[in-house]
Image: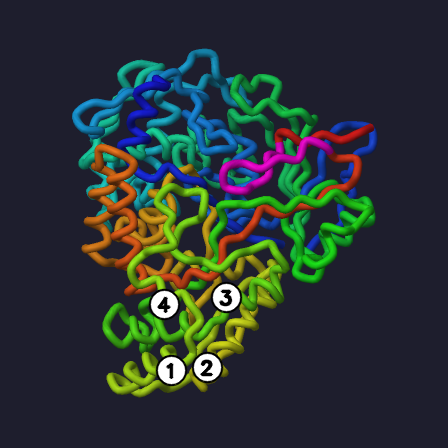
Amino acid sequence: MNTRHVTSLVAAGAAIVMLLSGCGSTGTSNSSNASDSNIISVYGSEPAHPLFPGNTTEAGGGKVVDQLFAGLVTYDAKGGIHNEVADSITSSDNATHYVIKLKSGWKFTDGTPVTAHSFVNAWNYTANSANKQASASFFSTIEGYDDLQKPDVDPKATLSGLTVVDDNTIDVKLSQPDSAFPVKAGSHAYMPLPESAFKDPKKFGQHPVSNGPYKFVSWQHNHSIEMVKNPDYKGNRVAKNDGLNFKIYTSPDSAYADLRGGNLDFTNTIPDTALTSFQSDKSLKAYNEPGGNTLTFTIPEWLEHFGQNEEGNLRRQAISMSIDRKTVAEKIFHGTATPAVDFLAAPISAYSKELKGNEVLKYNPSKAKELWAKANAISPWSGEFGIAYNADGTAKNWVEAICNYIKNTLDIDAKSIPMSTSDEFLSNVDSGKMTSAYRSGWGPDYPSADNYLVQLYDSSSADGKGGNSGNYKNPEFDAMVDKALSAPSTEEADKYYQQGEEILLQDLPAIPLWNQNATAASTSAISGVAFDYGGGPVFTALTKKQ
């Protein structure tokens, strides 16, 4: 990548930020804690989908895909961009035309070469709605994307804006300025795929062939995912260990018990029951650092009384103002989370405590009751208000706490709705089958405000094409983020992003709750624990005393 040029793009495009995504899972205590090798056993949860990078939007699969694949660029701990498979990414015509040059010599773990076709074929596959890939919206600014979203699209149809010039050159034409394009290029959606992925997608999803720091070994569903160091990897993230064993749990408490018992080496999911004690537990090493994760809950527009209209907006605002975020953070998160003031995380340049309308994120019971009464005047409330969550994660206590606040403030029946596994929960979220509100949140795919706002709330990310699971659509918001992507400087882009957030604060497609710290714990034998720009663990840096 041409560093000077990309730096100017980052400055021109958006608040290049620090971001996330998450989930959790109980374990079957498979003890691959190999004492005779530097294999690190780490906490994992069952992936919600087969291991296709373009269909991975949750932490269970995301942790795995991150280790197996290498994209055009990587990000450092501060969100800086560095070439990986790309040799350069240059733009022209107001960030509507990019030329990507690839480094030669890269290959997949089956020995086949990584070429321009490997990227373009993967991008076309992910963008084509017939293939039902959850990250399709990441390609929404490339010419031809809209044609690939038509109901009768040919599964083999491709993006007209992509051209393979030669084995090491890709020409990309966009339908609108997108200065965040070089930053997005390191996300899951943009990972290359070998030809075998398209010949037998079902087989590939269960046994992926990749080009990243690790090589896939096995996936025993609901038990473990194992990988070993890839000796042919040529990138920036060379592993300091011999491999990883993601032990799959359905309860963070079980994982933590295994950690304390020496049957697990590392976890970055601290259960609620241990938040008050994990940092003082002398049998472990504990970590608690600022992170880029956001924690929210979504009230989808298809629920009765919660359409994107005056009644729905009044009810969302009332519910938001009925929650005492500060007290819940103190009582449940014990210094590992801070109340949200906007839709971003603090490390992001567009993050602001001064947004117009952010009073809806502050505890105000009397105002909440007033707004709820106004909504009742439009259409009287009936029924109960529920918030669903996956019981194999860490949401139980905080979901129950905010339901109690809603119930006591608004005098309505509000309750938590546990769903047994992450897989069940996410399947219902992804398919739009939720019949209640549901816990949500975000961890960055790439370090840009674009990732928080466009991928979660833009119309292009709705209808199963991205992270906009509540199907929020507001043309005014869409127009504002488009202006941010066309802005000539970070400062101007941030102003547009903030104006877009002020629209979100009125509509509340998701209700911001807290920003979470990066927390983790390991056995005393583990060293090298580090976190990326979004607060996720850097698994390649882990090593174990023998």
Q: What is the distance, in whole Å, between disc 3 and disc 2 at their CAs? A: 14 Å
First along the sequence among labels 4 and 3: 3
Q: What is the distance, in whole Å, between disc 3 and disc 1 at their CAs? A: 17 Å
Crowd tier of the residue under label 4, counting other residues whose Cα lies within 10 Å: few below 14, some 14–19, many 20 or above: many
Q: What is the distance, in whole Å, between disc 2 and disc 1 at their CAs? A: 7 Å
Across and down, in percent, residue 495 comes to: 26, 46
Magenta region: 527-539
Q: Foreground residue, 404 or 45?
A: 404
Disc 2 + disc 1, Cβ < 8 Å: yes
Residue 360, numbered circle: 4
Across and down, in percent, residue 112 comes to: 48, 18
Q: What is the distance, in whole Å, between disc 4 and disc 3 at their CAs? A: 12 Å
Compared across the picture, whether 291 is left or right of 483 comes to right
Q: Secondary structure at mark 3?
A: helix
Q: What is the distance, in whole Å, between disc 2 and disc 4 at their CAs? A: 15 Å
> In the orientation shown, which residue stands out farthest toward the top?
104
First along the sequence among labels 3 and 2: 3
* Residue at (56% x, 39% y) in the render: 64
The residue where tag 2 is placed is 409
Disc 4 + disc 3, Cβ < 8 Å: no
The residue where tag 1 is placed is 369
